[in-house]
Structures are given as C-alpha cells and as structure tokens.
Amino acid sequence: MSALETLKQEKTRLESDVGALQASVAAQYEDIFNYALEQVKLLFPDLDEKRLSEADALNQMVDGKLVPFTLLGGK
C-alpha cells in the first residue's frame, strides 16, 4: 500500500473519530441541560409546565425571546 493510500485511510478514520466525538459531546450537553431543567422544575413546582417545555438546549435568547440557535446570533 502506498504512503498516500495509508494517509487517506488514516484521514478517513480520524474524520470518523471526530464525528463520533462531536456526537458524544452533543449528547452530554443535552443530558446536562435536561438535568438542570429537572432541577428547575423541582425547585419551582408552580412554573407553567407548558411554558417551561419551550426551553431547549438548542435555543438562544435574542431580544428577550427564545429562538433556535444560529451561529449568527439570530440576526
């Protein structure tokens, strides 16, 4: 096998590893967010459950509103 082929295979393997790591980090982030949300529900049992369900790890606050996350800050 040529050095170029070996490097191509290594690149493919590393790209796969990066993808798996990104997915793992995203899952951990989501788990931590949900854990914090459960604590809020426990501490504030009178909060509107429907309204609280609008909270999402992939939302951001823009102009006092929750909006889907974008890299440009919702603008």
Image (cartoon, rainbow, N blue to C red):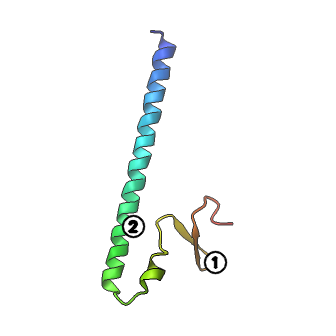
Please provide percent x and percent y for residue 5: 49, 15
Please provide percent x and percent y for residue 45: 34, 87
Q: Residues within 10 Å of mark 2 (few under 14, many from 20)?
A: some
Instruction: Check the picture and name the quadrant holding the C terminus.
Output: bottom right
- Residue at point 47%, 34% (across, down): 15
Please provide percent x and percent y for residue 60: 55, 69
Q: Quadrant of residue 17?
A: top left
Is 56 left or right of 67, judged from the image as shown? left
**Residue for badge 1:** 63
Inspect the image, locate mark 2, and give the three-letter code of the amino acid beneath it.
Phe
Residue at the farthest top position: 1
- Residue at point 45%, 17% (across, down): 6
Q: Give the number of the disc on residue 33.
A: 2
Instruction: Check the picture and name the quadrant holding the N terminus.
Output: top left
Q: CA distance from mark 1 to mark 2?
A: 22 Å
- Residue at point 46%, 22% (across, down): 9
